[in-house]
Image: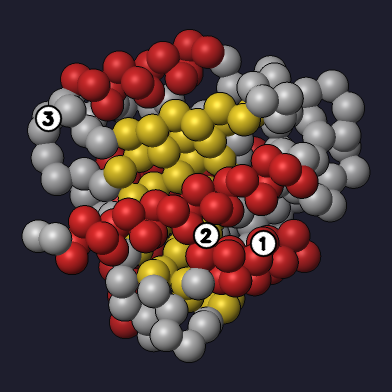
Amino acid sequence: MYTASRFHRDAARGRVLLMPDWEGMNSGWAQEIGRLYSQTCDAEVIVTDHYGQHRPHPGFDEAAYINQQLYRDTERSRSIFRGMVAALQAHWQASGPLVVVGFCSGGAFSFETGRSGAAVDAVFCVHGDPRTIDPIDQPGDYPVFTVVHGEIDPFVPQSSLDAFAEEMRAHRIRWNLHIISDAKHSFTRFDNRRSGYGIAYSKRAEIETRHLVAAQILSLIEANATR
C-alpha cells in the first residue's frame, strides 16, 4: 500500500503527480512543494512515493539501495509506476492534463513512468538523471518529456543529457531540455542543509521550474481544445 497527500483547488485546470527525491513524500519539503505547485499551476496535486506505508521515513542508505534496485530493473520499476498512476485515477477530483513531476531520483522515476505506457500527458525530470538502461525502442503514444537541469550540476553529466536526447529523437518523441544558468544540483530544495560543492538551493530556478510545469499544463489544454 502506498500513501499520498492531496492539495486541491476549486476549478483546478490540471493534475500534477509529484514524485519527491530520496526522502519521499513525508518530508516537510515535499509537503510544501506540493502546496506551491498546486498554487502556481492552478492544479490538483498528489504527492506520493514508492516506499509504501511500512517505510514512511527511509534513511539515506536504505533509500539508495531501494532506488538502485529500481534503476537496474526497469521492467519492475515501470510496472510499479504504471500501477501507481492507474491506482490513483479514482482519487483525482480534478480533470484536465495529468503531469508527473519528479525531483532527483523521483525525476528518473517520473521518466520511467513516461516510458511505461502509463496514462499521463507529460513527465518532468527536475535535477535528476534522465538516462535509462532500457531506452524506448519503438514508436508509440508517449507523453511529453522535459528535463530541467542546472547548468553547473556536476551529478548529472552531459552524457546523460545526450543519451536522453538521442532516445527521444530516435522515435520522434516530444521532448524539451531546459537548462537554468548558474543552478546546481537539488536547486529546488529550499531546506537544503548540504549546500556546497555541486549542491545549492536557487530560489530563481525553483520558481522558474514551477512556471515551466504550469506552462506545460496550459499548452496541453490548448492542444486538446484544437483537436
Element type at mark 3: loop
Residue drawn at x 35%, y 39% is 145
Which residue carries the number 2 mark?
18
Q: Is residue 86 visible?
A: yes
Which residue carries the number 3 mark?
138
**Where on the picture, by quarter, is residue 164?**
top left
Q: Residues within 10 Å of mark 3 (few under 14, many from 20)?
A: few
**Amino acid residing under circle 3:** Gln
The mark nearer the N terminus, 2 or 1, is 2
**180 relative position to 107: left or right:** right
| Nearest-to-viewer mark from 3 and 1 | 1
**In the image shown, does 126 or 66 lie closer to the viewer?**
126
Q: Residues within 10 Å of mark 1 (few under 14, many from 20)?
A: many
**Amino acid residing under circle 2:** Leu
Query: In the rendered view, would you say 109 is above or below 227?
Result: above
Q: Are marks 2 and 1 in contact (CB under 8 Å)?
A: yes
Residue drawn at x 45%, y 45% is 124
The alpha-carbon separation of the residues under discs 2 and 1 comes to 9 Å
Q: Is residue 153 visible?
A: no
Q: Are marks 2 and 3 in contact (CB under 8 Å)?
A: no
**154 relative position to 96: left or right:** right
Element type at mark 2: strand
Which residue carries the number 1 mark?
33
Quarter of the picture containing the C terminus is: bottom left
Q: Position of residue 107 (x, y in %)?
A: 51, 42
Residue drawn at x 38%, y 59% is 217
**Where on the picture, by quarter, is residue 80?**
bottom left
The mark nearer the N terminus, 3 or 1, is 1
**Where on the picture, by quarter, is residue 85?**
bottom left
Element type at mark 1: helix
**In the image shown, does 11 or 130 lie closer to the viewer?**
11
